[in-house]
Image (tube, rainbow, N blue to C red):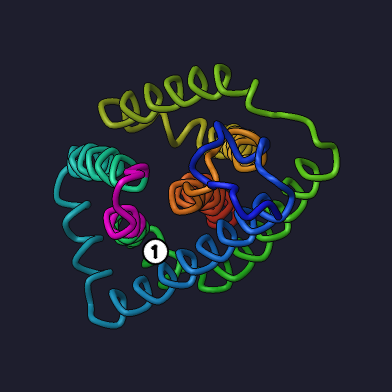
Amino acid sequence: MNSSYNPYAVGSVSEAPMETRTDFVRKTYLHLAGAIGAFALIETLLIQMGFGRIALQLLGASRFSWLIVLGAFMGVSWIANKWANNGASKSTQYAGLVLYTLAEAVIFLPLIMMATLYDPAAIGKAGVVTGFMVLGLTAIAFTTKKDFTFLGGFLKVGFLIALGVILAGVFMPGLMSGMGIWFSLAMVLLASGSILYNTSAIMYHYAPGQHVAASLSLFASVALLFWYVLQLFMSRD
């Protein structure tokens, strides 16, 4: 490698030398693995400490409780992403990743608790299926060398529609029960597209020093995929 090379001087990782690109991808996926491991540990601790049942009780108190939780999660996610993309401070970047991991653990708590009570095997099955899907999608992105960030516009529209359906479901509870499985399948497809998008962004569009932000974005997509795969396992007859 050229000793004068500055990893922050290039526009994107695709313009960096091969060694830098390889190191960036390695760091990104190591941080992703760390976030997933921390998420699993925090989730386990929260359930063991009794917070899982408390979460179910709070959400059951009002049909608007989930709307409040979703709004808070979106706000925290915005802050976490902003911190993770702070190029001036490594500590702020890591604070963003930690904050987002905690937020994911909290919002997953009622779903994981329900699975623990009614179908514990679903968690492991959903984890395995999600893992294989992530590996397959990652392999597609890396082996085809196609830039899937063209999906960005479709994903934005898809997520806006999904948010609209979720909000409508709060005010019309029967809506989600009538289309639950189909909605989960659509969200699995949307999350899969998001993984392809973020994997391509890791390969072509992030700057070499942005591995923390890259891992957060990919973690968000993996978590979304796991959420709806688990929903599918729990909704089967």
Is 66 situated above or below 175?
below
Q: Quadrant of residue 35?
A: bottom left
Residue 87 in magenta?
yes
Q: How many marks?
A: 1
Question: Is most of the magenta stretch helix, strand or loop?
Answer: helix
The 10 Å Cα crowd at callout 1, few under 14, some 14 to 19, many 20 or more, is: some
Instruction: Tell me which segment is drawn in magenta.
Output: 85-97
The image quadrant where one finds the N terminus is bottom right
- The residue depicted at 41 percent of the width and 64 percent of the height is 112
Front residue (pair 119, 73)? 73
Is 142 situated above or below 92?
above
* Secondary structure beneath label 1: helix
Front residue (pair 215, 59)? 215
- The residue depicted at 79 percent of the width and 49 percent of the height is 139
Q: Is residue 237 visible?
A: no
- The residue depicted at 30 percent of the width and 43 percent of the height is 77
| Left or right of residue 108: residue 153 | right
